[in-house]
Image: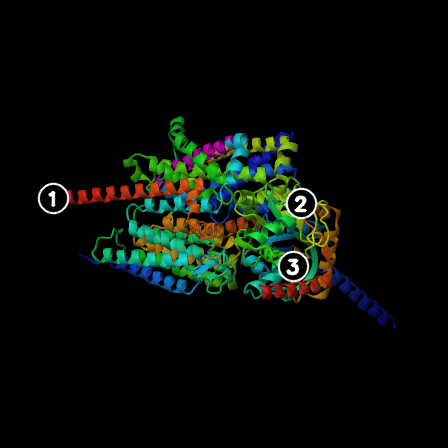
Amino acid sequence: MKVQSDLLFTAISTLVLGIVISFHASKMPWSCSGIPGPAVFPLIIGVALILLSVANIVLSLTGRSASPGKTSAKERFKALWIIGVSVAYFLLLKPIGFVVLTPIYVICLIAGLIDWVTVRQEKVGAKVVVEMILLGGAVTAAVFLVFAKVFLVSLP
Amino acid sequence: MRHKRCLVILVVSVLVLAASLVGHAYPQRPITLVCPYGVGGGTDIVARVLARHMEESLGVPVVVENKVGAGGAVGFSYTAQANPDGYNIVLVALPIVTLPVFQDVKITHNDLRPIGLVNGDAAAIIVRANSPWQTLEDLIEAGHSRQLRIGTTSPGAAWWIGAQILKQQTGIQGVDIPYAAGAAPMLTALAGGEIEVATCSAAEATSMLESGEVRILAVMSEERLPFFPDIPTCKEEGYDVTFSTWRGIMAPKDTPDDIAAVLEEAVKEAAHTEAFRKFLYDNKYGFEYLNPKEFKDFMDAQFAIFTEIKEDL
Amino acid sequence: MYYLQILVTITVGVLAGIFVGSIPGLTATMAIALLVPMTFYMEAVNAISLLLAIYVGAMFGGSISAILLGIPGTPAATATRIDGFPMSKQGRAGEAINIAAMASFVGGMVSLIILFSVARPLARFSLNFQSPEYFALAITGLTLCISLSSKNVTKGLVTAFLGLFLATIGLDELVSVERFTFGRLDLFDGLPFIPAMIGFFGFAELLVQAEQIMEQRRVAQKVTSVLPTWNDFKAILGTSIRGGLIGTMVGAIPGTGGNIAAFLSYDITRRLAEDEEKDKFGEGHPQGVAAAESGNNGVTGGAIIPLVTFGIPGDSVTAVLLGSLLIHGLRPGKSLFEQQSSLVNLIFAGMLISNILMLFGGIFLSRFYAKILSLKDQYLLPIIAVLSIVGAYSIRSSLFDVGLMLACGVIGYLLTKTGYSTVPLVLGIILGPTAEMNFRRALLVSGGSLTIFFTRPISLVLLVIAIIFLTSSIIQQSKNSARQRKMRNQAGMAG
């Protein structure tokens, strides 16, 4: 009977969400001109989420929930790196602008994803760095051309 | 002596050159015309056709950019906050005076500078082709004896207001059935029988009118519409009901006078071109034009009317 | 010479459509909207053939990135992703794209045949679809959530309800009350669908794959023998014809589009499959791809039906098409058919050619597109990241949407890592509003009486179908868990 903690975490989150939704929904009009009002569906959803979350909590506490494999900290770092860099990109996009920021973004992402140990072993550091910079520039140029020039989307 | 004269000539020519450059300084790059409504819709089409004709007198591309959302508020706000350099304008419609009244929207027509009104579409009272009512009076009689199913767009939007005005002025009793996605699904519901009457512009009902699914009982305008000379106005039928939606160009509030003047001229010319007027007529959009001052007065008056209507509801 | 010019226009249109469709964030609606002003300068036939060619191409194109990257290039390709993406993970991307092309072709052709023959009666029939019927249709679609999450019902339902919740965000359609918008104008009209979809499918998948970068090389794509054979075609023909029929009918109903058609086709195909096959759906079953793609391309002909008979757009692309028709002085309705029949015939012929070109173009391009996946992960993932961000931005030129996409991406990642599938979530977002609004509106019409859903024939039939689907899913579910329990017991006894 092992407790599956990550599953528990998600289940509790959905439970909390269900409670929040139900709370907000209860403040909306229940009925308007004789028909169910804006409150009804969200309330149903909120209650359903609460019930299902409880079921999931029970399942994860008793170790019966189906779950994909575990990931190591190193692997998880890759994903967290992407999230972090992407959030930074999002925040800096307006002040810095697309054309300048995107190559940097691409290079940072690649840098975080590359297995530097192997690179050092195979002594291809220089080649890898050049590839990174080239890709950064190429992606920015291609996207800019297609989105901004052809489709006239005004990128920041 | 000679040097002094040379100097004067030099200074004068530089000044003349500078003045001529300033005169030609605008426009130099493409102008963005924001359309606060979806691609392919009524306002979008008017915007695109108007833009094309404005390009002729402005000499630079006028690019329509759709900024959809919140019934138009997203597009209105976007332009209100844009750079007042003459390169950002917006085609506003009736909602700019109704949204602040009926919804909690913060933007009003006073946040923008009027350039010119280019179109007005009177509402038409539309029923299914095989409905039992032949005149407005028939409909009103029915509406006094039972609740009619009246189609509207979302509460606060133009055709919803039209329905409220209809009910207020004629005493028709009805249940409002809203279709937030616009006049098209509303008309489909009318054709299918889910609703019994709806108000919207002739332009939006064009294709259903021509395919014979629906017909107009009366129009809510001062005079008969040029493309429907046989259809009476509500006034003729004895009910003082008028309501139209309209569209006009506005720019950010602080746009400088000289740039605004160029825009005003361009819009006026474009709106009066033969081709534009033909386009409007063919697609049953009403032709109206108001210059900036008249436009502002018009919007103020509309705002007052709707505030009053809201209070009566 | 005249015909050659139209042919060139159509070819350009189809290729452009495939390209636009294959990039998440660029939709057919955007491409068509962009070209509308350009089409002013063209003759009506050229202009409309071009727009229709793009429409056909894009409906197929969306499947390409759905298969390769797991991000549907257009919302209509969401159902394609369910089996298409796993197929590409197994190294069968080229095969999947080929199937998508062939199925799209069959679906498109079926819809054209119907358009030619029974357009007017079908249009008339579609007028019977009012609020109760839309509700019933949405409910039928939502039962798919249960069958999709057969492995894990409680989790699947949670994500489905999450999706339904996200769908309630925005201004209530019927009563103008703000729900969960927290005052943000950006959320007034609801959660912007495409950024959310890119986030839940694209960015989330990106994060999951980043974790696995350390592991062995991605499965090599079989790009050598990628040309499909006649047998391959025959294998998916039945499913595709069925999908095309469903797509045409759904397309003819105003307000519904490729999304719903694809999901319905997928669901029905799955239910009709043999029991052992059923489990393979969702893990790379070719019939799944065929069903989805034929469904969404079936919509192309279907949506034209209400357009040319009544001037009612069947979906957002035809709404733009309607605008374009009007600009050219062509007014849909009886007059179009009677006065301009040669024009109408040319347009039909144009769509026929578009479909054929799309088939060949798709198969030809599949090997090039599939090669994209042979890029090393550390280069491919950043490219997908940039595309996701720009794609999310482009819909409304909104930075808020980018932030939203990232948030959905992180949430999707968390959900996937803990065994929740994001597919019911997206389905909930798509179908939620239709279900809720039409339910309430139908009650407005009936004066509060629920019988309206059962006294109207179409609504009744659809609801009965939904109940059948539901019960069969529940039976399936209990069969599954009984089987699993038996296996566990046997393993226990053996051990």
Would you say residue A128 is visible in this rendering?
no
**Residue C436, horizontal then vertical, whole percent:** 43, 52
Span of residues in magenta: C87-113
Query: Which chain does the residue under circle 2 lie in?
Result: B
As drawn, is C149 to the left or to the right of B155? left
Circle 3 sits on which residue? B87
The N terminus of chain B sits in image quarter: bottom right
- Amino acid type assigned to the residue bearing label 2 in the image: Asn
Q: Nearer the viewer, mark 3 or mark 2?
A: 2
Q: Residue at x 56, y 57 (%)?
A: B71
To which quarter of the image does residue C87 belong? Answer: top left
- Return the residue nearer the eye: C216 or B126: B126
Please, which chain is the residue tagged with disc 3 on? B
Give x and y (percent) for residue C74: 47, 45
SS state under label 1:
helix
* Element carrying mark 2: loop
Give the residue type at disc 3. Tyr
**Are there few (<14), some (14-19), or many (20+) residues within 10 Å of tag 2?**
many
What kind of residue is marked 1? Met
**Magenta stretch encompasses residue C169:** no
Residue drawn at point x = 51 percent, y = 58 percent: C398
Q: Which residue bears the numbered disc 2?
A: B283
Extreme top residue here? C230
Circle 1 residue: C493
| C278 is higher (above) or lower (below) than B62 | above
Helix, strand or loop: magenta stretch: helix
Packing grade of label 3 (10 A; few <14, some 14-19, many >=20) is: many
The answer to which quarter of the image holds residue C404 is bottom left
